[in-house]
Image (cartoon, helix red, strand yellow):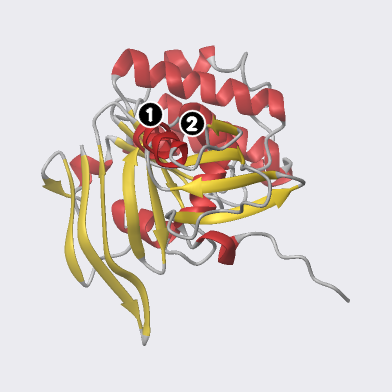
């Protein structure tokens, strides 16, 4: 289990993390989302021992991460800007990884050649961005990590390879109990794979819940009121829009509770619609203030 508790980090006068806390259950896929500059990458670099926090604790299975080589040998990491030696080939980087990860599997390395059809002796710098990211996954998965941390992991991969990579990772989650922490702006993709989600903004984790709990605690309703009636002002509505006679309401409560609250107004139609993770993200971060704005020139 990964635990980050009340972590703070400042760079000069800029406070990048301001009491951030998350908990990644063992064997789960945890999605860390937030706007640009929220502190996601900074938090991940602390988790991997690149940065040391000013205050707070970061532990994996109860052990501090900072300068813990034995623990880091069980953790894989693929950043957005994956590092490789400028003259290295795939096989050179394989030897490098094998020297740091005692559980590196040469059997898996050979097997994954069928998944990642990349010439081993070709310098990595001459590969496309997408092929370089394939090499990063190829090597990381061969390390057989108990924890895999990903920062914008599938950026640059084509749709078929994205699905292939996620299939391999989910297989390790199921078969080996690997835990995955992934930061991504592709919320539609996270919605398909994540068990838990944390939403960050301004260096804080605003909330973290299972994806099912998030979807149960916020609802979108399409409502038609009787002629001449609008949305009752006493309803706790986060956001409202209207097309013709149909109102779309976002409310922070369960679908059943929202339907019961609306029933007293005798609406002509009430239809509860599940929210996507992207919609939850927008309204948890401030409702209409984060919605797309129309600019008139």
Q: Residue furthest bottom?
A: 13
Left or right: residue 117 compared with residue 199: right
Residue at screen point 40% across, 35% down? 260
User: Are the residues at dot 2 and dot 1 in contact (C-beta closer than 8 Å)?
Assistant: yes
Label 1 neighbour load within 10 Å: few <14, some 14-19, many 20+: many
Q: Secondary structure at mark 1?
A: loop
Camera-nearest residue between 259 and 39 = 259
Left or right: residue 167 compared with residue 146: right
* Image quadrant where residue 255 sits: top left
* Image quadrant where residue 120 sits: top right
Camera-nearest residue between 94 and 201 = 201
Residue 284 % position (x, y)? 45, 55
Residue 183 % position (x, y)? 47, 47
Q: Quadrant of the N terminus?
A: top left
Camera-nearest residue between 254 and 90 = 254
Image mark for residue 139:
2
Residue where numbered disc 1 is placed: 143
Camera sees residue 150: no
Camera sees residue 251: yes
Residue 294 % position (x, y)? 77, 65
* Image quadrant where residue 161 sits: top right
Find the distance from the CA under tag 2 to the CA under tag 1. 7 Å
Residue 252 % position (x, y)? 40, 48
């Amino acid at each position: 289990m990964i635990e980050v508790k009340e972590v703070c980090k400042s760079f000069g006068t800029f406070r990048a993390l301001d009491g951030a806390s998350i908990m990644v259950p063992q064997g789960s896929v945890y999605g860390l989302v937030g706007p640009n500059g929220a502190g996601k990458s900074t938090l991940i670099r602390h988790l991997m021992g690149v940065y040391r926090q000013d205050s707070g604790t970061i532990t994996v299975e109860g052990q501090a991460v900072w300068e813990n080589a034995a623990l880091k040998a069980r953790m894989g990491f693929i950043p957005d800007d994956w590092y490789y030696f400028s003259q290295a080939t795939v096989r050179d980087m394989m030897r490098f990884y094998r020297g740091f990860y005692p559980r590196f599997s040469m059997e898996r390395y050979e097997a994954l050649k069928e998944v990642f059809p990349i010439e081993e002796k070709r310098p990595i710098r001459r590969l496309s961005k997408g092929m370089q990211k394939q090499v990063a996954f190829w090597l990381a998965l061969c390390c057989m990590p108990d924890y895999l941390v990903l920062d914008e992991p599938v950026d640059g991969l084509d749709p078929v390879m994205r699905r292939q990579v996620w299939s391999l990772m989910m297989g390790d989650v199921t078969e080996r109990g690997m835990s995955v922490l992934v930061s991504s702006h592709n919320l539609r993709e996270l919605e398909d794979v994540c068990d838990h989600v944390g939403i960050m903004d301004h260096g804080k984790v605003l909330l973290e819940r299972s994806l099912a709990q998030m979807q149960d605690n916020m609802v979108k309703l399409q409502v038609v009121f009787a002629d001449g009636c609008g949305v009752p002002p006493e309803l706790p509505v986060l956001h409202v829009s209207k097309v013709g006679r149909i109102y779309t309401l976002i409310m922070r409560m369960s679908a059943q509770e929202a339907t019961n609250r609306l029933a007293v107004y005798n609406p002509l139609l009430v239809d509860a619609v599940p929210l996507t993770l992207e919609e939850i993200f927008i309204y948890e971060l401030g409702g209409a203030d984060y919605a797309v704005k129309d600019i008139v020139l």
